[in-house]
Amino acid sequence: MSFLIECIDCGHTTGYNPSEFNCPRCRSQWRRAVYDYEKLAITLPDLLAKRPFDLWRYIELLPIHKPVPSLRMGEGGTPLIQAINLGMMLGCPNIFIKDERQGPSASFKDRQAAVTIAALKEAGITEMVAASTGNVAISYSAFAARAGIKLWAFVTSLVPAVKMREIALYGSQVIKVTGSYDQVKKIAAEFAEQRGLYHDMGARTITSVDGMKTIAYEIAEQLTDQLGQPEDGSRWRTPTWYVQAISGGLGPIGISKGFHEMQQMGFTSHIPAIAAIQADGCAPMVHAWKQNQEEASAVINPKTHIETLATGTPGRAYPLLRKEFKENKGLFESVTDEEAFRAMHVLAKMEGISAEPASAAAFAGLFKLIRAGIIKHNDTVVVNCTGHTMPAEPLVLGSGWARNVVLPQESETSNSAVTPKEGEGLLAALSRVAPDRFPRVAIVDDTADARRLIRRILQSQGEYTIFEATNGREALELVKREHPDLLILDLMMPEMDGFAVLDALKNDPNTANIPVIVSTAKELTKDEKNLLQGQIQALMQKGDFMSDEFLEEVKSLIR
Ligand SMILES: *Cc1c(COP(=O)(O)O)cnc(C)c1O
Ligand SMILES: [Zn+2]
């Protein structure tokens, strides 16, 4: 475990002391750990083969001499989950979710905290200061608690109260500051300096950068497991894109370092493009990028509900990322809060993954970039999914998301063995809120995946009685038997295709008025489009609609 600390400005190298923030030669605070890559190119594969899948399997590439096993809480080694339903909706089958929610404190900050706290422990440091938009302080608090390190956590008053209480629960001292996150950072730094305490330096923290880079290594190993070794014979596969919501930019700085190291060791041949997503109301890097500026101007008053993303002054992180993105086709993009909340809802309903709004911003960015044709349909994409869901649910769900059931009061003497009288009890109460005639929707498609997707979209919001048919003939029988209020029809099916089904329906006065949404993967010719004109109510192109857009069509056609 040998490494040196190298200044990115003057190249000076030294040993490592976490309390030394500046390069001794040029005073730069931008330094990084470098390792014996030539040796690791040979030794690492065998070492990795024997180790469990967690962050510490890359110990030779972390700035720690002797990790203390008792500090570990299962950091790293998070799953890489293929987003099947999103992939179908967006026509982009290789979307993968790096599920950082499954870290010890449910965000990818656990990687920076695990490595940094290990280094502080090694250096005998027992007190530290961190400014945070929430998640950094939560992660540090958890690991600091284990390591016997006191944490002073400076947060803005905008951080949701549940997050603040979680920080306090771990025994950290919460300092709630009314002001912007950038002001909070300044105050925290002053406080640390006055008291001579170690303080977190954001994207300049050597240990944090290398903690984050383990995401890149894991992605390469996992993609290779799931998709096989790349065609060019490299050991590991890398994605075309890595997508992450960014605030200070530590994540992408660490992740790009990881990908560069892998390439330097000859394990991979390609550096992924990084798409860094900011919130519209606080997007200094996006503005600078779109105007091709070398420096980002500060956003003094961030206007976003997504406090996790409210870094208004990116400082040096921006030019560093800009250089990386120019070299490897990365980009900055922003999304509105509304787009993020919508993506949060889609992700939860369609993939079963509930992310916090900051993460949802990354997904909203993904949707935007695919639709703009920037992320291509055959690209492999990994999206960082991280964080706590709770703070935004009310905003996302709107009203009417729960049903109230008031049970008749049980009397003192009743016991559960006694059958409730008719019209009493839970079932009776529930059936009062469940009207027996939901809109009836028939899904006609020969592929099971497509039927499942539409069924999922329908059942995720509102109530429908759903029927399925797998070919045209079945569809006609189903329509006669069940009288659906809406037909969702595929065009290309064996035996009897969708056009023939439409003909038959329209020729029968009993079925001629059933509204039809055609959902097809087929690129329609002009003749085919003319044929459908007046016959159907909506045309949805498979691979080019989101669940909520589809639902809106459905709702507009059923009264
Ligand atoms: C910290 C954080 C970000 C921003 O990450 P940076 O790489 O530090 O810019 C985005 N999303 C979530 C959930 C976070 O906790
Ligand atoms: Zn220097």
Image: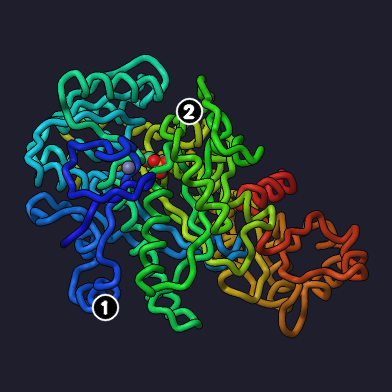
Ligand 2 is located in which of the four quadrants? top left
- Amino acid at dot 2: Gly
* Whether residue 428 can be seen here: no
- Give me the residue at 31% from left, 58% from top: 214
Q: Which residue lies furthest to the top in this view?
A: 178
Residue closest to the eye, 466 or 38 = 38
- Give me the residue at 34% from left, 37% from top: 28
Residue closest to the eye, 122 or 388 = 122
Q: Which residue lies furthest to the front in this view?
A: 25
Q: In which quarter of the image is residue 163?
A: top left
Q: Quadrant of residue 82?
A: bottom left
357 horizontally vs 463: left or right: left
How far apart in space, not on screen, are marks 1 and 2 (Cα)? 43 Å
- Amino acid at dot 1: Ile
Q: Which of marks 1 and 2 is in front?
A: 1
Give the structural element (helix, strand or loop) at label 1. Answer: helix
- Give me the residue at 45% from left, 68% from top: 238
Where is residue 518 drawn, in percent x and y?
75, 63
Residue 42, disc: 1
Give the structural element (helix, strand or loop) at label 2. Answer: loop
Where is residue 387 drawn, in percent x and y?
36, 43
Residue closest to the eye, 464 or 193 = 193
Mark 1–mark 2 CB contact (< 8 Å): no
72 horizontally vs 311: left or right: left
Image quadrant containing the N terminus? bottom left
91 horizontally vs 177: left or right: right
Q: In this view, does 55 lie above or below 134?
A: below
- Give me the residue at 71% from left, 43% from top: 559
Residue denoted by label 2: 312
